[in-house]
Image (cartoon, helix red, strand yellow):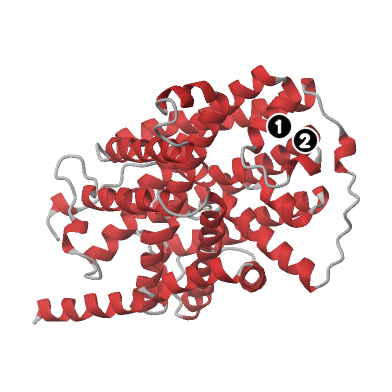
Amino acid sequence: MSDSNQQLERKLGLFPVTNIVVANIIGAGIFTTTGYIMDFLGNPWMMIILWCVGGVISFCGALAFGELGAAYPEAGGEYVFISKLFSPLLGFLSGWLSLLVAFSAPIAASAIGFSKYLTWAFPGFQNELMLNGVITPETFSSVLAILLILGFSLIHSLGVVFGARIQNVLTVFKVLLLIGLIVAGFAFGEGSFTHFRSSSLMRFDFANWKEIGLALVFVMFAYSGWNSATYIGSEIRNPRKVILRSLLISTLIVTVLYVLLNLFFVYAIPPGQMVGETEIGGLAAGNAFGPVAEKIISLLIAFALFSSLSAFIILGPRVYFQMARDGYFFKSIAVIHPKRKVPVNALYLQAVIAIVLVLSGTFEQILVYMGFALGIFPVLAVAGVFVLRKREKSVLPLWGYPWVHLIFIITGIAMLVLAYCQRPVESSVAILTVLSGIPVFYWFNARKKKLKN
């Protein structure tokens, strides 16, 4: 593994890394979760407050991960931080979750979100391809999602620089789309600020807090990816500066966009109509601009989801690659293409798992399961900053310590507990997914020791 052909190369600067982070955050979550959140809360202002809270929590996490990324500028993100600061077992469980959930599940969700928005915009196109009822709508949606996953996995197997160029175009397009939708929505769209009035009052009893906790899980799923620059640390030029700056810039941009976009959703859609609605962006565009605009915006959102799907496909394989290099995964996953400098086998493995997720479960179940699972290890990684400072190994001590870190940790734990109380089945499945990695770790650990002997 010391051969130069098996090393990732530092070719990415601030602009492409920031684009990857923005694209990784803005995905299926913002276009699909608002209807579920309104269902849980029933109060538009509480929903807006939670989107603001999600931005603050993500910013706190970005500060912590910026310090961790400066100390350990390697591929792998949380896997590396937790392995070095706590234990290889905990680090492996983080990587195991990344393999099964943290990247594969958002890839599946983004692909499904794309197919839903595309068929929302062109139902006739779907009907023709379903061969007059021979293929069901669910099967059609799954096939379309699978083809998308395979296509982008192939694109990113061609090299990180080529993939980053594609990513730059997709991300700029997506940000411009969101800005245009927000500005046009309030300037020219039909809507009413009376939609912000709600007859549903928040009681703040335990039942209400459970709903808030579950809603925040969905919000944080939409913000997930705020830490994504740390997953490609081995391919970033000047990582000490670029990782932190990309995380903070991206989180601020996304928070502003998310809050404004949800304000537009409420302005365009009465809260009662938002409840449980998956294609919330298309519905808002239809209400604001009419049925023709609804189709156009739905189509644009569908293609904007390319950007987040693409970013997830870039990042995930770097985690599995690092695990394999450390001896805690199959050696073949650490193979880098000699010319393209990409961990191609890790890419293909991720595509297979994402496809399996596309074929299993409902969209909402995937969101709850994924949202809960994604909240576990960032809390532990941020706690690692305390260990880093104690060992005096921080090369970029940032302001806000320890309060910023405590805010992230306390809110993260509270969110998980409340979400578990509200959705114990999906949350338990997420926990069991984590625990299933324990025997796998010990198997790889024993195998690693045997190979050394």
Q: Is residue 159 left or right of residue 142?
A: left
* Label 1 sits on residue: 284
Q: Looking at this view, name the residue that lies furthest to the top.
A: 292
Q: Looking at this view, name the residue that lies furthest to the left.
A: 453
314 to 328, vertically: above or below: above
| Residue beneath the point at 82% across and 49% down | 45
Residue 218 in percent (x, y) is at: 62, 55
Indicate the quadrant containing the C terminus: top left, top right, bottom left or bottom right: bottom left
Crowdedness of circle 1 by 10 Å Cα count: few (<14), some, many (20+)? Answer: many
Q: Is residue 225 left or right of residue 37?
A: left
Q: CA distance from mark 2 to mark 1?
A: 6 Å
| Residue beneath the point at 47% across and 22% down | 125
| Residue beneath the point at 37% across and 79% down | 87
Disc 2 to disc 1: CB gap under 8 Å: yes
Label 2 is placed on what type of residue? Ile
Q: Is residue 402 left or right of residue 199?
A: left
Q: Secondary structure at mark 2?
A: loop
157 to 207, vertically: above or below: above
Image quadrant where residue 319 sits: bottom left
Indicate the quadrant containing the N terminus: top left, top right, bottom left or bottom right: bottom left
* Res. 98 visible in picture: yes
Q: Nearer the viewer, residue 224 or 120?
A: 120
Question: Which disc, if any, is residue 269?
Answer: 2
Residue 435 in percent (x, y) is at: 41, 76
* Res. 18 visible in picture: no
Q: Secondary structure at mark 1?
A: helix
Q: Nearer the viewer, residue 162 or 274?
A: 274
Label 1 is placed on what type of residue? Ala
Image quadrant where residue 78 sits: bottom left
